Image: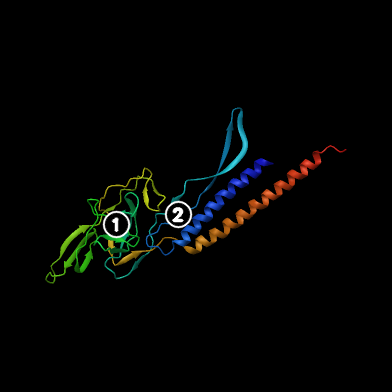
Amino acid sequence: MDKSIYTALNSMQILRSNQSVSAQNLSNTNVPGFKKDIQANFGSLYLDREKGIDPRVFALSDVGAFDSSQGALNPTERPLDVGIDGDGYFIVKPKSGKLALSRRGDFKIDQNRILTDNTGAQIYNVDLEPIEIPEFQNISISKDGIISIQALNAPPGQEINVGQIATTRGTQNVKLAKSIDGYIRTDDGKIPEPDQLSTIISGFLESSNVKSVDQLVNNIEQSRAYEINVKFITTAKELDEAGASLMRIPN
C-alpha cells in the first residue's frame, strides 16, 4: 500500500510547485515584457531493480520553461518606451549577475545618464557596453535601435547618434531558460551575440503575456487535484489498517 502513497505524495509535491508557478505568473501580470513560466508536465517513471522493474511508479515533472510568445504592444507616446515587434531580445546587464536577455522596454535615464530599464538593469549597446545619454532637447529611437538626440544647445533639426541598442534573434537553435534572478539566458549561462535583426518600435510597450483568467482556472484545478491526492492517501491508510486487522490472529 505504501507504493500508492509515495506516488500520491510525489504528485502533491509537483502540484504545490505548479501552484507556486501560477502565483508567480499572477504577480507579474502587469510587468512589461514578462514571459510567463510554464507549469510542470506530469509523466511516469518505473524504478529499475537488479532483477526487473519495480512496480512502483512516480509522477515526474519536466524542467520548468517559459512561454516566449509576444505580449500586446500598447501605445504610450513616450519615446523611451520601446517594444520588439516579433522575435528578439534586448541585451541587458542586471544590477547583480551576468549579461542577460530581456523583453522589458520601459527605459529611463539614471542619475549617471546611463540608459536602464525600470528595474535598474543597464541597456547595452552593440559593443556590449552601457549607453550614456547626454542632456538633450529631444530623443528618438529608430527601428534598428539607433538612439538620436538633439543636444541642449544644438540648432533645430541637428541630431547626433549616441548609441545603438543591442538586440539579438540568435536564439532559434539555442535552449533558453530563466535563471534564478528571473532573467533569460542560455543553459550555459551565456547569451547570443548581438545581430540587430529585431524590429524596435518606439512609443510602445510590450505587456506581459500572462492571461490572469487562465492562471486562476489553473490554480483551481491544481487545488482540486491536490485535494484528490489527500483523499487518496487517507483511503489508502484506511485500507491498509483494514488489511492489517484481517491478518491478526485471533486469541
Q: Amino acid at mark 2?
A: Asp
Residue 29 x %, y %: 44, 63
Q: Quadrant of the N terminus?
A: top right
Q: How many marks?
A: 2
| Structural crowding at the residue carrying mark 2, measured as other residues with C-alpha within 10 Å and reported as few (<14), some (14–19) or many (≥20) | some
For the point 53% across and 55% down, the residue is 19
Percent coordinates x, y for residue 160 in the rendering: 15, 63
Q: Is residue 138 above or below residue 187?
A: below
Q: Is residue 81 left or right of residue 65?
A: left
Q: Position of residue 172 (x, y in %)?
A: 34, 47
Label 1 secondary element: strand
Q: In the rendered image, which quarter is residue 123 located in?
A: bottom left
Kind of residue at badge 1: Gln
Using the image as rendered, state which of residue 160 and residue 173 is in the foreground.
160
Residue ID for mark 2: 37
Q: Please name the residue shown 54% across and 61% down the image.
A: 217
Q: Mark 2 or mark 1, which is nearer the start of the sequence? A: 2
Percent coordinates x, y for residue 65 in the rendering: 44, 50
The answer to whether the residue labelled 1 contacts the one labelled 2, judged by CB atoms less than 8 Å apart, is no
Is residue 117 shown left or right of residue 7?
left
**Circle on res. 40:** none
Secondary structure, mark 2, is strand
Residue located at (19% from left, 66% from top):
135
In this figure, which residue is indicated by the disc labeled 1? Answer: 122
